[in-house]
Amino acid sequence: MARITIDDVTKRFGDDGDAVVAVDDVSLDIKDGEFIVFVGPSGSGKSTLMRIVAGLETQSEGDIHIGDTIVNQLGPRARDIAMVFQNYALYPNMTVEENMSFGLKMSTDMSDEEIEETVTSSAEMMDIGELLDNKPGELSGGQQQRVALGRAIVRDPNVFLMDEPLSNLDAKLRAGMRTEINRLQNDLDVTTLYVTHDQTEAMTMGDRLVVLNYGELHQIGTPLECFYRPANRFVAGFLGSPSMNFFEGRLEGGTLRADGFDYDLTEEMQMAAGSRNELALGVRPEDMAIHDRANAGHEFEAVVDVVEPMGSISYVYLRAQGQEAEGTFIVETDGQRPITEGEHVYVEIPDQDVHLFDIGSGETIHQRNLDREAEVALEEGVQAADRVE
Amino acid sequence: MATTDGDSATASQRLDKDTRETLVTVLRHTVLLTWSFIVLFPLYWLASMSLKPPGTANSLPPDWIFLPTLYNYIQLIQDSGFVAAFANSLLMVSASVVLVLLIGVPAAYVLSRYDIPMERDVLVWILSSRMLPPIAVVLPFFIIFQEFNLFDTRIGMVLMYVSINLSLVVWVMKAFFDGIPETLEEAARVDGATQFQGFMKVVLPAAKPGIFSVAIISFIFAWIELLFGLVLTSFEAVPVSLFVYSFIGSRSIEWGMLAAASTAMIIPVVIFLIAVNKYLAAGLSFGVVIKE
């Protein structure tokens, strides 16, 4: 068990002249037993950051602490970590049992009997007891995944590192393994770093998310905190599926003049906007509503471009009437609502669900409102995550 | 009516299809049999020639039916020169295969895994050692061997065989190592192995099929080498290929002995092949590691 501190870590690849900054001055405190998910699009530096913690890459600047030790100079073998790789990296020439015992043989002085006992019990735990004599090549993808996890668990390490471990599984298996990893992490209570580009995994798995893009740290927080209180436009757009809709526009006397429609800011929003004369408004597809007729005057007219029926819900791609630019925004509607392409509808953006972002920095200047209960639950979640120790 | 017509139509089509399949099968087997005959007949010719009594080996028309005799083989075994050359070759060629693997495999690994300055050029340079026809380099070899007292020595021959096979080993093994994901070594390092242990315990075993493939090819290339043996040896380090060649005299060719010696030469290669066959066949499909 160990806490991990990442202290002003920067990683540059390549020569000084045309170096690529993969991780840009990231600082992070990971508590003992915490499940942390590094999430971001490809090229965000999330894998590099994990590999730095593993000791497979050396940072250009900054320190990594595991427990009370600064591990900058230590190789992976001295860090007492176990890692699950995206491609599993099972040793092809060894049986499952040999795969699982390899780490114990290399890093401990356990006797052969002890090793066998440990391997067997971990294999039982992962439900791969019958596969111990098989070679990895004889296993299905799902079984290989379990072996890879088993190989990590058997080590009983200070830290688990998981680099997109589920991305090679089909959708159904992935959902099952997601739950299983969650359960394992709860049971074992080992500090876990988990890298993924999949925002569903990020939302459902971690105690806290670390959202990265282009090597920069954008937000650290509980999944719900990042979802409902995004620090900036990138986080708001990255979490949630489909993504948040953004409307940029000029601010004229308390009205946002967006492409194709006007939106009247509330007083609270106007306060937040301050002296800015440009803004980006963000609102999630599930918070917007479609009406057949204009009701209160808040709505604006739009044309249906494409409808994606998902069953219980439909995603409706719309274009504002009179919109000049290309592109559409998405509104989620009831799957039973009849709606056809080319239809004219009225779209409502509820005031309480609106986020406002600075055009230049992308920083959030106004967060959406939550119900009292949701607000309390969110706060409690944040405090619980802070308490983990 | 229409239905009946339709049925008969499909029936005749099916018949056609069956006939077609039979024809294809017959044709396929004919081609395979012809090819087998082309490949195997010289071997049969060689073996049968080696088993004929002296004087009749070369008779025309050939004696298709004859009483096989081991006379040629007994003569061969009693010929100390042949036995010495055979043992010589076995020793020199085996040693050269071990040495070329010891040099070539680590070199290929380094070329595969590390950023070497001018890596492409290094690789082409290694290959270029095989670009000149052997006859063009045999004289320089001769002079160098004389300078370094390697002429007609087993060590000299081993080094010569290594120089012949090194480029092959490096190129094939580099491609092989390129196909082994680096995450395997990273997993080993995370598991507590040193980089060297990772190479020895994880990468090398995974590369076994490749290693055995280049080993057998190197063995064959060295085993059948004739030109360098002819120029670089005189008495001590004569390889078996050269000895077999000596049955072709200026006035007559000892066909029986030549055939027996040639057949004997095939045996070590076949034994080697059978011994490593399992790795050659089992290997090349990895299936374990999904490529990113």
Image (spheres, coloured by chain):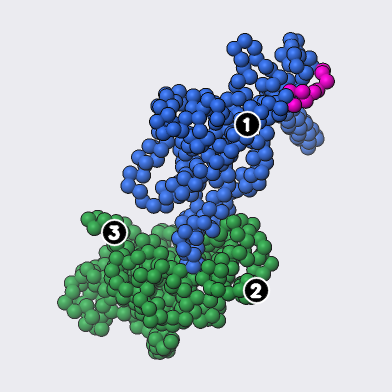
Residue A70 in the figure: left or right of residue B28 = left
At which x and y percent is residue B132? Answer: 42, 27
Q: Which residue in the protein does label 2 denote?
A: A113
* Residue labelled with disc 1: B84
Label 3 sits on a secondary structure element that is strand
Say which chain is blue. Answer: B
- The quadrant in which residue B31 appears is top right
Task: Give the camera-side residue of B40 and A108.
Answer: A108
Name the residue that disc number 3 marks.
Answer: A20
Q: Position of residue A217 (x, y in %)?
A: 32, 71
Which quadrant holds the N terminus of chain B? top right
Segment tinted magenta in the rendering: B65-74
Residue A197 or residue A130, whichever sits in front? A130
Residue B167 sits in which quadrant?
top left
Instruction: Report the Cα–Cα distance between label 1 and label 3.
Output: 64 Å
**N-terminal-most mark, 2 or 3:** 3
Chain identifier of the residue bearing label 2 in the image: A
Task: Identify the chain drawn in green.
Answer: A
Name the residue located 58 percent from the left edge and 74 percent from the top edge.
Answer: A110
Asked whether, in this view, residue A245 is left or right of residue A334, the answer is left
